[in-house]
Amino acid sequence: MASATLFTNVRPAGRAATDILVRDGRIVPAGEPAPAGAAVVDGGGALMLPGLVEAHTHLDKTLYGMGWYRNEVGPRLIDRIDNERTMKRTLGIDPARQSARQVVLSVGHGTTHIRSHVDVDTEVGLAGIEGVMATRERYRDIVDIEIVAFPQSGMLVRPGTVGLMADALRQGADVVGGLDPSGIDRDPKGHLDTVFGLADSFGKPIDIHLHEGGELGAFAVELTIERTKALGLQGRVTLSHAFCLGMPDVAAVDRLIEGLREAGIHIMTTGPASVDAPPVKRLAAAGVTICAGNDGIRDTWGPYGTGDMLERAMFVGMRNNLRRDDELQLALDICTHGGAAVMALDGYGIEAGCRADFVLVEAETVAEAVAGHPPRRLVVKGGRVVARDGRAMAEAP
Amino acid sequence: MASATLFTNVRPAGRAATDILVRDGRIVPAGEPAPAGAAVVDGGGALMLPGLVEAHTHLDKTLYGMGWYRNEVGPRLIDRIDNERTMKRTLGIDPARQSARQVVLSVGHGTTHIRSHVDVDTEVGLAGIEGVMATRERYRDIVDIEIVAFPQSGMLVRPGTVGLMADALRQGADVVGGLDPSGIDRDPKGHLDTVFGLADSFGKPIDIHLHEGGELGAFAVELTIERTKALGLQGRVTLSHAFCLGMPDVAAVDRLIEGLREAGIHIMTTGPASVDAPPVKRLAAAGVTICAGNDGIRDTWGPYGTGDMLERAMFVGMRNNLRRDDELQLALDICTHGGAAVMALDGYGIEAGCRADFVLVEAETVAEAVAGHPPRRLVVKGGRVVARDGRAMAEAP
């Protein structure tokens, strides 16, 4: 049976070596014999982890594969936003092509699910959304992609953007995005009312970029908590970055964390080294779901990024001073089950009955996989091998 | 002539492709013809960088190659120090073997010079120093190693340590180490007087671990400046970590930076993500020499570290929010020329007349080399190829 495969000699989450039978794209309960004619793939004693979840990136605007971009951009957020709009025209950053390139790179590193913010503005219109939708369709067998309609250049300050956001949601975007309600739109109430209004009208979840630090960011968190509760959107709202949760006033942060927990709001972090960052141990202890993402990979914003979510787990670990093995397990959970919870994935995991989306890593323990992010021996999606030795089998344009 | 080699088609520091002739271990001025019989090595158009300088590590106590160490250590500095002394006995961390393993790993990544702190205490005595000295001798043709006698467990609080430090300097240690004058020895004046006293007696430079943050760290910096000036040790003293230079009081930090500049004191940073860190752009602008190191690699302190100084340049860049190409050049300079200045290396660089210690990297630009730290095609030490494709030719035990 072509639809059954036996993956021999793998160590699920670092437990004892075993064989994993996959049938019709799902993991079969231990003990069931492999059917005659099942394919056999040697796992070589590798560590088996669930597929990595890239819960925050920007597929539409990576420069990966376009030659090195010499970054000479000014230091302010608005410098970077304006420069990017210009560069999209000047450099010819094709969203379909570039998203495809990043997808193939990411799958090679073991990513099986991606949430991508995609720019919607009055210059590019829905071109980004359409490009990433084409990539989603093209690579649907090797990765699941969720699209956030993202008003990168502001929403209320650029008339026409709200209508484009609605169009994006009608055409296939899955999530309503938002951005720095005070810093960019200069109107926290207006911005958040619009974002939540769109989510309410279209029945979609929300994912808001919140770079605002300190008290200003804390205010936006409070407004988000109020609206989430008022509209019954518990479990459907994510705050990305949320640097303000790293501010020094620990008592104030604890009050925010309690509010986030009550409202079932999720937090996305990249584990940023140069700014305040959400404290993942305290958030996890409070029961807040945390996910992580690589954010932009080699784009006009910055030169970093490999697309590897195990490397990202390492960054989250380093940023949060995670050193013990149990702490590194948390970093991995954030880059796997945390992202799966935020994206509300069905049948995610490496237990019996789950979808067979997993990664084999050349590491002794989960902690070693995080700290060293060694090469991926094999990536499996829906029971099929989609990458070997760090490289996806699918071609990139 | 076996002592002449022509490295063809390389791009020094990203400039136009050229051939580099090496004779008797030195780079020959451009234009000189290769002698008949010179060996030829194809550079394949790779970027040519000077040998990477690992200016702060702990060769004697990496666990690299010993199987995964399950870290269950408590959170305080003293927990980690005490745990390590215990583990040295329990795990059998042989300094000669372990330093050799790390050296071979590092050379594969393009490191040509290492400054290693090596523990000196009343339990291990000089065993660590002797082990790393054996490794230095064994690998002298592929890497230069400088040894810092390092009182990891405290100096004044553990009677007998000062005598051992003096013995270490007599036997071959090159630099006098120190550690958290207040935090560990509980006597900033006593600790620093002892460190500077040893340096003065033996005519050696100084490199002090200073984890102390905020005002306490600033006080230690001031005491160090005073002693450096009093003893005429300008250019011979390094403060490692110096987290206090990242404290929020920018005006206070500026005063410290001015003092460091006047006293010619160097700063070593790892670009740590989870604590305050020295601001490299401000230090560099003030004319303070900065170097970097990987610190401990996979040891009882923490699980991280690959030994790659280009990855470290990326960490320094991420920690300091370096995004522009000119900023990433600074990150590379810290991991090359900065370390060379701190170690007072003679003939370091990739200009004519310099020692032929260099690295070929598969990258378009210096910025790409830092941001992506791609594999090293070739590592050359004293004109000889010592590593290919990320792996040293020398064997590790």
Image (cartoon, coloured by chain):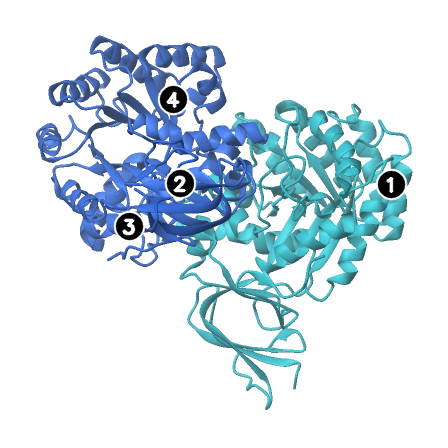
Chain colours: A blue, B cyan
Residues flagged by tags 1 and 3 on a common chain: no
Looking at marks 4 and 2 on the same chain, the residue that comes earlier in the sequence is marked by 2
10 Å neighbourhood of mark 2: few (<14), some, or many (≥20)? Answer: few
Q: Left or right: A396 with respect to B205?
A: left
Q: CA distance from mark 2 to mark 1?
A: 59 Å
Asked if labels 1 and 2 touch by Cβ distance under 8 angstroms, the answer is no
Q: Label 4 lies in what chain?
A: A
- Tag 4: residue type? Thr
Describe the element under mark 1 as helix, strand or loop. Answer: loop
| Helix, strand or loop status at disc 2 | loop
Q: Would residue A308 appear left or right of B266 to someone viewing this image?
A: left
Label 3 – label 4 distance at C-alpha: 38 Å
Between label 4 and label 1, give the one nearer the viewer.
4
Q: Which residue is mark 4?
A: A289
How far separated are the C-alphas under marks 1 and 3?
64 Å
SS for callout 4: loop
Q: Do the CB atoms of the residues marked 3 and 4 lie less than 8 Å apart?
A: no
Q: Nearer the viewer, mark 3 or mark 4?
A: 3
Tell me the tag on residue A33: 2
Of the residues shown, which amino acid type is indicated by label 2?
Pro
In the picture of the structure, the residue carrying the numbered disc 1 is B125
Labels 3 & 2 near each other (Cβ < 8 A): no
Q: Quadrant of residue B76?
A: top right
Q: Residue at x 57, y 48 (%)?
A: B306
Residue A21 lies, with reference to residue B387, above or below; the image says above
